[in-house]
Image: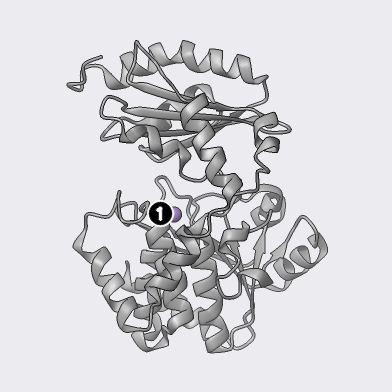
């Protein structure tokens, strides 16, 4: 984190007339929502006028985070979003690296007249006025903790802010399972505990709020839908629109299911193919150094991290599954074979 960038940002935030817009990525997850919540609370404490603007809606399971219910959605309040973007002098791009991840807000954020602050941990970030981006970090919330404490010291962090930052670190690492082997991550968590983090409360909110229908949907996916391919160490879970309706699907209900096949020793790659109203969505997960983002990018209009990527196609579900199976040969020959993997 460059001292010079921090000092420039400190001077900008000292401007008494400054208003701030905070924007998470489309389909915000725990890291994006936690970082937006934490940053908004910090601006509240400092008396800096700020608003979180979303291109869609935060999912229900993150609504307990402070300030998250106050976010303004472009879907039902587009005028307020556009107005605030005109008044704001600083746009905070949270947990994403390009305007293209801002859904219906993109046309308005792309031509934003003020300065842009990026706080993120994805590869290949665009150039902005103040860029804090580090792919080694577990979560944007870990990076945001460092930025906040470098700017204002640890004392600004209270229970609400600590809970929000911890939410991002916990969810982006799958509950401290992946992408969290650096000691620094745990020093941040230790500091958050010292600043009032309610770890049990956060855990309860994030992981113990299952509904019966959601748990049944998970069971259905694993028992009736998951297919493990014979030729490749690949599991596929196709889910139809009809099934989502049967299990009273709500946003967030499919969270985590795609990871489950990877608990099978022989399975190295897991793909969930979900039929939605306008398109079919793909969610890719892998173990070790297998780059599923390459597969998502080449065949499914997507991309992402090496071990977690997404994509989408506007084709019938059956054709999507066919394309997945056909392109599996290319992917496993090109990116998996020769890495010591037998299949
Ligand atoms: Mn993240």
The residue positioned 74% from the left and 64% from the top of the image is 81
Residue 132 shows in this picture: no
Quadrant holding the N terminus: bottom left
Vertically, is 184 above or below 216?
A: below
x and y percentages locating residue 136 in the rendered image: 29, 53
Residue 76 as seen in the image, left or right of residue 41: right
Quadrant holding the C terminus: top left
Q: Indicate the quadrant where residue 16 lies.
A: bottom right
How many numbered discs, if any? Answer: 1
Q: According to the image, what is the colour scheme of the structure?
A: one colour
Closer-to-camera residue (115/83): 83
* Label 1 beta carbon less than 8 Å to ligand 1: yes
The residue positioned 61% from the left and 69% from the top of the image is 68
The residue positioned 80% from the left and 62% from the top of the image is 77
Badge 1: how crowded within 10 Å, few (<14), some, or many (20+)?
Answer: many
Vertically, is 86 above or below 123?
A: below
| Ligand 1's quadrant | bottom left
Residue 272 shows in this picture: yes
Helix, strand or loop at mark 1: helix
Residue 248 as seen in the image, left or right of residue 208: right
Instruction: Please give the residue where the numbered disc 1 appears in the rendered image.
Output: 172
x and y percentages locating residue 285 in the rendered image: 40, 35
x and y percentages locating residue 113 in the rendered image: 66, 64
Vertically, is 82 above or below 237?
A: below
x and y percentages locating residue 276 in the rendered image: 68, 33
The residue positioned 56% from the left and 63% from the top of the image is 62
Closer-to-camera residue (113/172): 172
């Amino acid at each position: 984190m460059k001292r010079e960038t921090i000092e420039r940002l400190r001077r900008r935030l000292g401007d008494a007339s400054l208003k701030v817009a905070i924007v998470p990525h489309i389909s915000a997850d725990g890291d994006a929502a936690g970082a937006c919540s934490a940053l908004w609370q910090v601006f509240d404490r400092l008396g800096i006028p700020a608003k979180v603007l979303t291109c869609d809606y935060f999912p229900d399971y993150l609504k307990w985070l402070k300030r998250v219910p106050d976010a303004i959605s472009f879907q039902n309040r587009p005028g307020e979003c556009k107005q605030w973007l005109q008044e704001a002098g600083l746009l905070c791009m949270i947990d994403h690296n390009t305007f293209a991840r801002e859904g219906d807000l993109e046309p308005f954020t792309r031509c934003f007249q003020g300065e842009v602050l990026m706080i993120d941990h994805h590869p290949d970030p665009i150039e902005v006025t103040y860029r804090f981006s580090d792919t080694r970090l577990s979560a944007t919330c870990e990076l945001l903790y460092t930025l906040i404490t470098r700017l204002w010291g640890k004392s600004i962090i209270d229970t609400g802010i600590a809970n929000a930052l911890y939410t991002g670190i916990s969810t982006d690492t799958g509950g401290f399972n992946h992408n969290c082997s650096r000691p620094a991550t745990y020093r941040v968590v230790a500091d958050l505990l010292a600043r009032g983090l309610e770890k049990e409360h956060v855990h309860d909110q994030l992981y113990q709020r299952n509904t019966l229908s959601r748990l049944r949907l998970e069971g259905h996916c694993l028992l009736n839908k998951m297919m493990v391919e014979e030729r490749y160490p690949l599991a596929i879970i196709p889910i139809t629109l009809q099934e989502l309706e049967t299990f009273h699907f709500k946003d967030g209900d499919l969270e985590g299911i795609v990871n489950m096949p990877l608990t099978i020793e022989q399975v190295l790659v897991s793909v969930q193919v979900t039929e939605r109203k306008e398109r079919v969505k793909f969610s890719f997960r892998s173990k070790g150094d297998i780059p599923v983002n390459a597969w998502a990018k080449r065949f499914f209009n997507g991309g992402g991290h090496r071990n977690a990527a997404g994509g989408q196609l506007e084709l019938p579900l059956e054709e999507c599954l066919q394309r997945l199976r056909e392109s599996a040969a290319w992917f496993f020959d090109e990116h998996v074979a020769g890495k010591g993997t037998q299949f």
